[in-house]
Image (cartoon, rainbow, N blue to C red):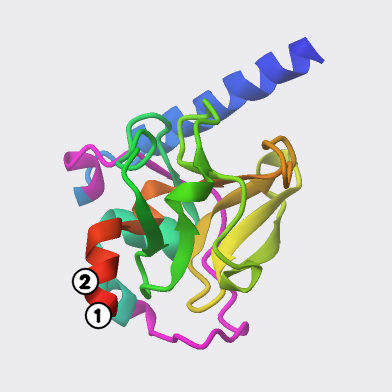
């Protein structure tokens, strides 16, 4: 088992390095935005309440957000905005602004990505099957716009036993004091 974990880790690092160094000419690389695209774009036949064309998404999202939310990419672990964030507040979808996760449910999974043991409400995220990298995982998408957020694993803390491992660039953070002022 230990050998398998080491092999998979080395393979993932290799895929990540190939992805970040294979498109040296593109703008994202110039800005050192290490994002690896793992799958095809969201299914255009699947309908979500919040709809945009590809051109509209490119207009409203940064290149990194587009690559992750619409291209199902993965940002580099540990070098992302919210992994070490300890502020109280909520995390919303960077694509459509839908509330997703609360800081009350965030914990340090030591994975390098922001992790939560549950969303604010189960209806705010949707699950899809991800068969990339010769494995089957459960992908988590925003239930409002279909944007790729990350994956969920069954190695999290109690009470759920789940680890929602999310990409920082797929979310925006709203501090607790800003939430209170917006609701008044």
Q: Quarter of the image holding residue 18?
A: top left
Q: Which residues are magenta?
A: 28-55
Above/below status of 177 relative to 78: below
Q: Position of residue 160 (x, y in %)?
A: 73, 47
For the residue pair 165 and 45, the one nearer the viewer reads as: 165
Q: Quadrant of the C terminus?
A: bottom left
For the point 59% across and 75% down, the residue is 43
* Few, some or many residues within 10 Å of mark 2 (<14, 14–19, 20+): few
Above/below status of 131 relative to 100: above
> Is 48 covered by the magenta stretch?
yes
For the residue pair 173 and 178, the one nearer the viewer reads as: 178
Secondary structure under badge 1? loop
Residue 7 lies left or right of residue 31; in this view the side is right
Q: Position of residue 107 (x, y in %)?
A: 51, 37
Magenta part mainly helix, strand or loop? loop
Residue identifier under label 1: 184
C-alpha span from label 2 to label 1:
5 Å
For the point 66% across and 41% down, the residue is 133
Above/below status of 113 relative to 146: above
Confirm or deny contact between disc 2 and disc 1 (CB under 8 A): yes
For the point 57% across and 29% down, the residue is 12
Residue identifier under label 2: 181
Judge whether residue 71 can be spotted in this image: no
Q: Quarter of the image holding residue 170?
A: bottom left
């Amino acid at each position: 088992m230990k050998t398998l974990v080491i092999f998979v880790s080395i393979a993932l690092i290799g895929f990540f390095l190939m992805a970040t160094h294979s498109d040296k000419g593109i703008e994202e690389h110039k800005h050192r935005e290490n994002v690896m695209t793992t799958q095809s774009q969201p299914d255009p036949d699947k309908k979500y309440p919040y709809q945009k064309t590809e051109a509209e998404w490119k207009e409203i999202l940064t290149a990194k957000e587009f690559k992750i939310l619409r291209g199902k990419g993965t940002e580099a672990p540990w070098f992302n905005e919210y992994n070490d964030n300890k502020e109280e507040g909520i995390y919303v979808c960077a694509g459509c602004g839908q509330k997703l996760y609360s800081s009350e449910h965030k914990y340090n999974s030591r994975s390098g990505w922001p992790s939560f043991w549950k969303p604010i409400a189960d209806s705010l995220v949707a699950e899809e099957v991800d068969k990339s990298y010769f494995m089957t995982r459960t992908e988590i998408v925003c239930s409002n716009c279909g944007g790729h957020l990350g994956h969920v694993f069954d190695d999290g803390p109690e009470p759920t036993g789940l680890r929602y491992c999310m990409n920082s660039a797929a979310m925006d953070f709203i501090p607790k004091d800003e939430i209170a002022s917006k609701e008044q």
